[in-house]
Amino acid sequence: EPEVTQTPSHQVTQMGQEVILRCVPISNHLYFYWYRQILGQKVEFLVSFYNNEISEKSEIFDDQFSVERPDGSNFTLKIRSTKLEDSAMYFCASTGTGVGEQYFGPGTRLTVT
Amino acid sequence: QKEVEQDPGPLSVPEGAIVSLNCTYSNSAFQYFMWYRQYSRKGPELLMYTYSSGNKEDGRFTAQVDKSSKYISLFIRDSQPSDSATYLCALGETSYDKVIFGPGTSLSVIP
């Protein structure tokens, strides 16, 4: 069964460092998303991406964040200068055209020290 | 009023019980309704997906949507210890829109 994959599963970084979180969405899906979940809190939307551009972004997704689809399979989230409060689980999700349901990856746990 | 609300629990039931999990929402523009199961420190796993009001059944799971009351439910029949997890409702306005999650209900099924 097709699934969304994410790497790495756990990333530890120092405050101020850049991190890139990687995702491989389901192959025939066209809409891609990043969400995050701070420990003990609900899953929050960050950004949606379609046709090689951002469709929508939340207030959380400030200038420190960027997304890219560098090739036909990968979808990345970059945080330019990490802060302590960026520590969270980051989930990638994807959906097909006109379908509606979103499939989530296993997540990357980002720890900023 | 929060956009999507769920009773956080924890909810503890004996094995074999019928479980009822609920969400209420305030935005009448939501048209797509999903239930996810999340184990600790794992990604949300899609359980059920419905569009518009009505019932949908899949094995031991039944999803129910009442748009007039802005109320959705997930029923789990013959609950198993492996059903112990946090259950998240998620709602979207269009088929490609972001989804808005509820805070989740923690469920424990006791053998």
Image (cartoon, coloured by chain):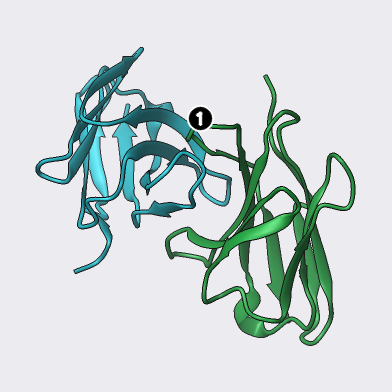
Residue lying at 71% horizontally and 32% vertically, measured from the top left: A26
Chain whose colour in the figure is cyan? B
Q: Residue B6 versus residue B90: which sits nearer the camera?
A: B90
Residue indicated by mark 1: A99
Q: Residue B3 versus residue B61: which sits nearer the camera?
A: B3
How many numbered marks are there?
1
Q: Give the residue at the far right of this rendering.
A: A71
Corner quadrant of residue A14: bottom right
Q: Give the residue at the far left of this rendering.
A: B69
The answer to whether A57 is drawn above or below residue B31 in the figure is below
Residue A64, position in %: x, y?
Answer: 72, 80
Residue A36, position in %: x, y?
Answer: 57, 62
Instruction: Name the side, left or right, on which A24 lies relative to A107.
Output: right
Residue lying at 52% horizontally and 70% vertically, measured from the top left: A58
The answer to whether B54 is drawn above or below residue B46 in the figure is above
Image quadrant where one finds the C terminus of chain A: bottom right
Residue A82, position in %: x, y?
Answer: 74, 81
